[in-house]
Amino acid sequence: MRWGLLSCGLTGAVGAAQGLAEHKDTLGAPLCPCRHYEDKEAEVKNGFWNCPCVPMRERKECHCMLFLTEDSPFQDGEATIGIEDISREISGGGA
């Protein structure tokens, strides 16, 4: 909990993490997967939406809702998600 934030829940966290990982692999940077870009390569170079994005770094506002403040009505109260939880979710086993 380095940022003092919680997750939005396992399914949302896994989906956002998979999108970030895919962008890291294909674009070389973890570009926010929850936005539409006309030119992803240009956005990566700009750096604004590379995770953690500028709004996250400056105001703890995560567009993906991957990280939420403790007072957010969308957080699920869990500060960590284990690798077993992620593996189960990816394989379709659910939480």
Image: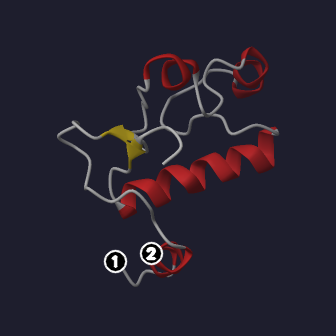
For this view, does 52 lie left or right of residue 89?
right
Return the x and y of residue 1 as percentages of the image width and height.
48, 48
Q: Residue furthest bottom?
A: 93
User: Which residue is denoted by mark 2 in the rendering?
Assistant: 89
Quadrant position of the C terminus in the picture: bottom left
- Indicate which disc residue 55 carries: none
Q: CA gap, disc 2 to disc 1?
A: 6 Å
Return the x and y of residue 38 as percentages of the image width and height.
62, 21
For this view, does 66 lie left or right of residue 51?
left
Residue visible at 44% across and 75% down in the picture: 89
For this view, does 37 lie left or right of residue 93?
right
Question: Picture quarter containing residue 11?
Answer: bottom left
Asked whether the beta carbons under mark 2 and mark 1 sit within 8 Å of each other, the answer is yes
Return the x and y of residue 44 as percentages of the image width and height.
74, 25
Residue visible at 79% across and 19% down in the picture: 45
Circle 2 crowding by C-alpha within 10 Å: few under 14, some 14–19, many from 20: some
Pick whichever, 4 or 34, lies toward us. 4
Question: Picture quarter containing residue 64?
Answer: top left
Q: Secondary structure at mark 2?
A: helix
Question: Picture quarter containing residue 43?
Answer: top right
Residue visible at 43% across and 80% down in the picture: 92
Return the x and y of residue 7 as percentages of the image width and height.
38, 51
Q: Secondary structure at mark 1?
A: loop
Q: Earlier in the sequence, mark 2 or mark 1?
A: 2
Q: Amino acid at mark 1?
A: Ala
User: Which residue is denoted by mark 1 in the rendering?
Assistant: 95
Q: Is residue 78 above or below residue 60?
A: below
Q: Is residue 38 above or below residue 17?
A: above
Residue visible at 71% across and 20% down in the picture: 47
Q: Amino acid at mark 2?
A: Glu
